[in-house]
Amino acid sequence: MRHFLRDDDLTSAEQRAVLARGLALKADRFAETPFVGPRTVAVIFDKSSTRTRVSFAVGIADLGGSPLVIDAASSQMGRGEPISDTAKVLSSMCSMIVWRTFGQERLDQMAASSAVPVVNALTDQFHPCQILADLLTIAEVKGGLSPEGPALAGRSFAYLGDGANNMAASYLVGGALAGMEVRIGCPESHSPRPDVVARAAEIAESTGGSVLVTTDPAEAVAGIDAVATDTWASMGFEEAGHAAEGVLKPYQVTSQLMDLGNQAVFMHCLPAYREHEVTSEVIDGPASVVWQEAENRLHAQKGLMAWLMDPEQIAG
Ligand code: CP
Ligand code: NVA
């Protein structure tokens, strides 16, 4: 049985296979029914969500299943029932557990005691489902689609802003797996964790990708295919984010920075805070692909769930 707790829980080839599956399901929405029965999938939220909640609920239903969306605060998890006990109960009745939580170690504990696949719907450290959707979007808008999945090797991608957050970490690792040139532009105070940069660089060596972390936003976006950013105040870190507005301001995605790219598209996992990490002119302008990116959460995650439910993955 396989879990998807961080981007590199898939190999490069598996990531491509998952995305190919997502693309096929985008073209033929009800073509696969791995949850027929219907089987139930628990989708649990310790933090707020719009896109993740909706895309998993709709995706599970599309795949023939029944989504059980749980607000953790109103469950016994919110009263501190051990994660391992929760995992045993949920996996005795559900076919998959999707969880948005705080520390990655909580997700690891869930997976360790679960008899069914566990999927990361965002932690403080990673947001790997978002990166699957983003890779699919880049392939759609920049070319590189094939029946075997997106061929993204050689494409370049820059992320500006809070380089220490979950999105930056997943872009580094997930982008390197796809063989992309990944650049992070951030202040020194908001650098990605060294272990994440090291892991991405190690992966990039085998996929032909590359990794660059720079404090110069212009260097990060020069000649780039896609520019992404994310909120400066991630959930659970709001106070620190607001306090860092001054140091992050040079990394705001503006039209001037976008013009340095190679007809770059603009991406954002959303929700966005206009005039903070990105200007309204950019996010609401012609280069923005954020709505396509948001919709692709549905298709990419369906590809992932169908793949995780394959008998060879369940038995493996
Ligand atoms: N991008 C994303 O995960 O959005 P939500 O917080 O709305 O789920
Ligand atoms: N970095 C953001 C992503 C939200 C989808 C957060 O963790 O709040």
Image (cartoon, rainbow, N blue to C red):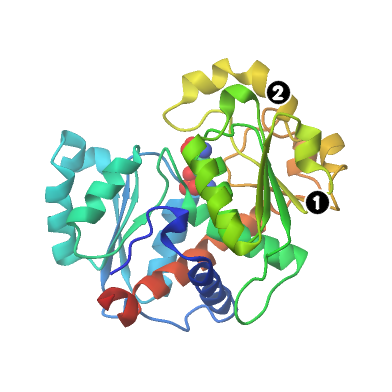
In the depicted structure, whether residue 141 falls above or below residue 259: below
In the depicted structure, whether residue 253 falls above or below residue 20: above
What residue sits 88% from the left and 42% below the top?
Answer: 259
- When asked about the image quadrant of residue 9, the answer is bottom left
Please state which amino acid type lies under the numbered disc 1. Ala
What residue sits 59% from the left and 31% below the top?
Answer: 162
- The dot on residue 249 is 2
What residue sits 25% from the left and 55% below the top?
Answer: 111
Please state which amino acid type lies under the numbered disc 2. Lys
How far is disc 1 from disc 2 in space, using C-alphas? 21 Å
Residue 310 x, y percent position in the rendering: 35, 79
In the depicted structure, whether residue 223 falls above or below residue 249: below
Q: Which secondary structure, mark 2?
A: helix
- Disc 1 beta carbon < 8 A from ligand 1? no
- The dot on residue 264 is 1
Question: Is residue 114 left or right of 270 when viewed as pictured?
Answer: left
- The dot on residue 46 is none
What residue sits 52% from the left and 44% below the top?
Answer: 198
Question: Is residue 250 left or right of 233 when viewed as pictured?
Answer: right
- When asked about the image quadrant of residue 214, the answer is top right
- When asked about the image quadrant of residue 176, the answer is bottom right
Question: Is residue 264 left or right of 100 when viewed as pictured?
Answer: right
- Position of the C terminus, as image quadrant, is bottom left
First-in-chain label (1 vs 2): 2
Residue 75 x, y percent position in the rendering: 19, 43
Between residues 222 and 101, which one lies in front from this camera angle? 222
